[in-house]
Amino acid sequence: MFSKLMKWFSSDRSEEPRPLSSKPEPEMPSAAVAMLCVRVKDEFSATLDERTMREVVGQLRRRQKIEAIKLIREKTRLGLKESKDIADDLETVLKWA
C-alpha cells in the first residue's frame, strides 16, 4: 500500500488516488431499518423508499446529521421535530448494528 502511495506521489497525478482503505462500507442493517420504515409509515403517514433511506444512512455515517434531517423533511414533507426524531432513531439503530 505504501509503495502505491509513493508511486502516485512520484507520478504526474493525473488521476485521483484511490482510498487507502479497501474495506467496503458496511451493509445497512436491513431488518432494523425496515422496522423503522414501517414505524415512519404508521406513526407519521409518510414513506421513505429504500434509496432515500440508504442516502440518509450514508449521511449519518459521515456524521452529516443536519443534511440527513433535511433529506427526510424533503422526501416526507414532515416537520423538523418529526424528521429529527426519525434521524435520531436511525442513528441509534446504526450505533447498535
Image (spheres, rainbow, N blue to C red):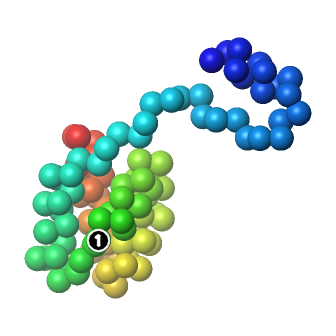
Q: In the rendered image, which quarter is residue 24 located in?
A: top left
> 95 left or right of 40?
right
Q: In the rendered image, which quarter is residue 5 located in?
A: top right
Tell me if residue 48 can be seen: yes
10 Å crowding of disc 1: few (<14), some (14-19), many (20+): few
* Outermost residue toward the right in this view: 12
Residue type at the position of mark 1: Asp
**The C terminus lies in which quarter of the figure?**
top left
**The N terminus lies in which quarter of the figure?**
top right
* Outermost residue toward the top in this view: 3
Instruction: Please name the residue shown 45% across and 30% down the image.
Output: 23
Instruction: Please name the residue shown 19% across and 72% down the image.
Output: 40
Instruction: Please name the residue shown 23% across and 47% down the image.
Output: 29
Q: In the rendered image, which quarter is residue 81 located in?
A: bottom left
Give percent across and percent down for residue 63.
46, 50
> 3 left or right of 23?
right
Name the secondary structure under disc 1: loop
Residue on which disc 1 sits: 49
Q: Nearer the viewer, residue 89 or 15?
A: 15
Q: Nearer the viewer, residue 33 or 9?
A: 9
